[in-house]
Image: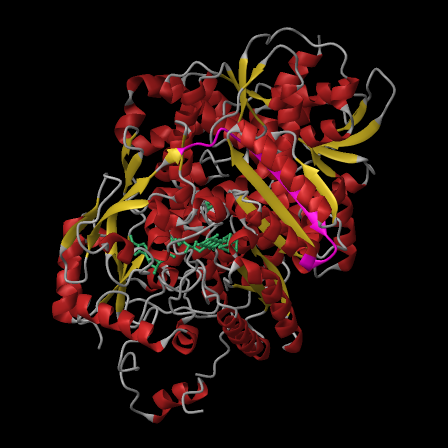
Amino acid sequence: MMITAKTINKIRSIVGSENFFDSPEQKLAYSYDATPLLSQFPSAIIRPRTTQELSEVMILANHEHFALVPRGSGTGLSGGSIPTENSIVVLTNHWNRIIELDEKNLTVRVEPGVLTAQLQSTVESIGLFYPPDPGSAAISTLGGNVAENAGGLRGLKYGVTKNYVQGMEVVLPDGSIVSLGGKSVKDVAGYNLKDFLIGSEGTLGIFTNILLKLIPKPETSSTMLAFFDRISDAGETVAEIISSHISPSTLEFLDRTTINCVEQYAHLNLPVNTEALLLIEVDGHHVVVKEDTEKISVLCRKHRANNFSIARSEQEAVKLRSARKIAFSALARVKPTTILEDATVPRSEVVPMLERIQSIAQKNGLLFGNFGHAGDGNLHPTCLTDARNTQEIRSAEQAFGEIFSEAVKLGGTISGEHGIGLAKRQFLEKLAPLPAIEMMRRIKESIDPHSVLNPGKIFSLSPRCEGPMPKNASQIKKYIDAGAFT
Amino acid sequence: MLEEKKIVHNNHLLTDEILNNCIHCGLCLPTCPTYALTSLEQSSPRGRIRLIRAALDGDQPISKEFIYEMNFCLDCQACETACPAGIKYGSLVETARDLIHQSKKNSLTERILKKFFLTWTFARHERLKFMARLLRWYQTAGPQAVLEKSGLLKLISKKLNTIQLLAPRISKVFTSEVLDEIILPQSEVTHTVVFLTGCIMDVAFAEINEDTIRLLLHHGCKVVIPKGQRCCGSLQAHNGDSEGAREHARYTIELFAQFNPDYIVMNSAGCGAFLKQYGELFDDDPVMRSKAQFISQRTVDVTEFLIRTGFIQSQKKYSTRYAGKRITYHDACHLIHSQKISEQPRELIRSVPGIEYVELPEASWCCGSAGIYNITHIDQSMHFLKRKIENIRKINPDIILMGNPGCMLQMQFGLRNAGLQIELLHTVTFLRRICEA
Ligand SMILES: Cc1cc2nc3c(=O)[nH]c(=O)nc-3n(C[C@H](O)[C@H](O)[C@H](O)COP(=O)(O)OP(=O)(O)OC[C@H]3O[C@@H](n4cnc5c(N)ncnc54)[C@H](O)[C@@H]3O)c2cc1C
Ligand code: SF4
Ligand code: SF4
């Protein structure tokens, strides 16, 4: 159903004309996020000034049947903030104040549009630490991080976003404003609702402020880089580091293709004919850091690292980190379209998973680079392709389907940190246990009976038909071309 | 609808690849001044690229809003530095402006301003000098002081008042009028360099040109200053007049090639950035292209040249003139983003014994000068300037150095308005004074 002019006027009068956007140019600019291949025009974009206004719009949505799609910075990789049909995009990135930094309780209350890196540098300047650091930290919003339960390079030792969310204020789909959690570290008063909203991908509520936990900044750190001739050697190194009870803050991996791309792009003098690179960092008390560094260097040599270096200064550390830091950039330059996924397996299965990805890529005639968080099994198989080559894109979709199902077979999951959104919905429906999906659907339906909030994300809502029914031949053709009846 | 939708554009810097390589990751957003100002996607690099792509595909008309966003862009190219996919954003926005230029839909004031400044004034250096003389008379003979004091200008229009204060203080003599074409150093010749005088530098900062020449001579260079230099074409290119740009480039290439220089040295970042692109400008003309490449490959910013030719190592004596001074450096967009020159000037400054070097927060953010942006978009420009001045205030230096005349004009205005007593110098002036012990 189209949103009527009357409804539009009501929305406009709630948020004010200067916060209502619906020119073709603006709609185009809000038709995408960082997800390849997907885009859709919204009906309008709004920038509510207050939580109250947001709640009013939400109530209106229930009465007049339109959908709202929350958006942070639009760096999501699963299409979470891409508009659905007849939807209004709700901006949150203008809410960007750090409200209260409480050094006694080690918490910080932020508006959802504060950028991850902005928070990190603010708290680090007073000796505190907010560990989650997705690769997009320079621009991702904390609201988007909580909605996606974003991970990052420090996940192995410090966990992911959910480990740092202590509370939030949220506008629910019926327009009610609730405050969940709080500054007390322990809280078992009823269902754990805040955890339930973390990772909900903007489908259960819109965060209007977030209370985050901070920790003291680690005293010191040490950075190491190792290269291996065989992936299995790197895998064994990782396994033994973990089984010897060392907890590196970073344990990252690059495969041969990625190493070569990095070298071609940045000329860092990396040994190019090696199969794997490990970037390892330990942090904490200086005595422990020193001990762990020694242990790790012994382990790397034991597992036949052909090249091993330890940074002796921060400058050198930056140099060692650079290969991993620019992995994504280097791959992104090879071909016009870069499809980065986040299939995740138990740590012990990383090497078998990598081998399977390689053979799937070969079978489908595709170029894949692999890198990722070896420490927690979160891989980033990355397909380098070209959106204009429809044949190849179809092969890529086929390959990812196979990769996801292998990940599930190995006891893993189809998404470790980017979420399901629109991009992986079909795989979730195929690969997740049916009762689990049913439970999710029932929860969604009871909290959002009129499907006003980010509908059609994560799983399609029953009935499985979105938008207006196709009526004439040309409308139906669109669906046939998309393979509807095959 | 069977009509051909693709719009034909004649920008020679653009290829299909540039457009399609944007993976819309958003990593450029936090570096974009216009996005920082509005926090709206359409005024971000990613949003503009999407708009340009739609325009080139024929899905987006050259609408008022399209024009607004393209002109709102500073063309500072901070987004290019941040982009992991290596998008040549500068070429894209120049193509978009070319489309606008062709469609003749720019607003009347914008067209008149651009026509006047770019097509008329900068097309012949004599005209620029004529304008400059007029301005010099205005600044020295009294009318400016009278008008400023009386507050009459302010009364008529606040904007007009700001614009006239932003105008350069015109130099007493122009470089191009007083110097021989070839000057030899006192020592043995190490390099033969052509020196580009630059339009603005020549009339507004002749002393900096003199500093540059003296520094080059001190460094053992035979300095060639070709007579009859014109605008290099960058001003036309940045404002969507690609044909005009090519014409100026062709002239400059022929003029400089005669001297067969080892290097072509300049002290205006914008000119350097553009000369380095000459090669790409003539993609469709093989003869011209190879000549252009010859010039591009030899083009260097003066700081880049000094580092490359071992200036620091050969330096024996330093003046103590600035001992104990707190010194900072502002990155001109056309140095750091277009030419990727950021370490060289810093290295030169830090090599001076006895000074205290402090990093300027957000040193690489545009000051809002951006060609004639501070005239066409005065309110936005003043906003960016304010942000820059706030950052300077945070570290409170004695001296601020930079490598571009446009930035110097803008920042002089900003410092004066803010009542800050901070000395503002071109990097070259600082080095010349330090080295001529
Ligand atoms: C180069 C690059 C590297 C990346 N690296 C990582 C990584 O290492 N780890 C990782 O986990 N992810 C990574 N990502 C993915 C992405 O950055 C994260 O998912 C991030 O959390 C999204 O934040 P955002 O502000 O851009 O949100 P958006 O993309 O705008 O939105 C994401 C989802 O959150 C919802 N949402 C946004 N704000 C709110 C709110 N206030 N309330 C409720 N819902 C909201 C949206 O509806 C959407 O479903 C990367 C992305 C890129 C482009
Ligand atoms: S950083 Fe580059 S690839 Fe990413 S959105 Fe910006 S221009 Fe596109
Ligand atoms: S050139 Fe500067 S102003 Fe223009 S989009 Fe890029 S960063 Fe923004």
In the rendered image, the quadrant that contains the N terminus of chain B is bottom left
Answer left or right for A51 relative to B179.
left
Answer left or right for A121 relative to A468.
right
Q: Is residue A222 magenta?
A: yes
- Where on the picture, by quarter, is residue B254? top right
Is residue B279 something that shows in the picture? no
Instruction: Give x and y (percent) for residue B44.
Output: 42, 51
Position above or below: A174 against A318: below
Instruction: Give x and y (percent) for residue B272.
Output: 65, 38
The foreground one among B391 and A191 is A191
Position above or below: A359 against B378: below
- In the current view of this chain or complex, which residue is farthest to the bottom? A473
- Where on the picture, by quarter, is residue B325? top right
Answer left or right for A389 relative to A94.
right
The foreground one among A427 and B288 is A427
The foreground one among A71 and B340 is A71
- Where on the picture, by quarter, is residue A443? bottom left
Answer left or right for B124 relative to A144.
right
The foreground one among A172 and A412 is A412
Q: Is residue B378 magenta?
A: no
Start-end of magenta stretch: A216-232
- In the current view of this chain or complex, which residue is farthest to the front? A244
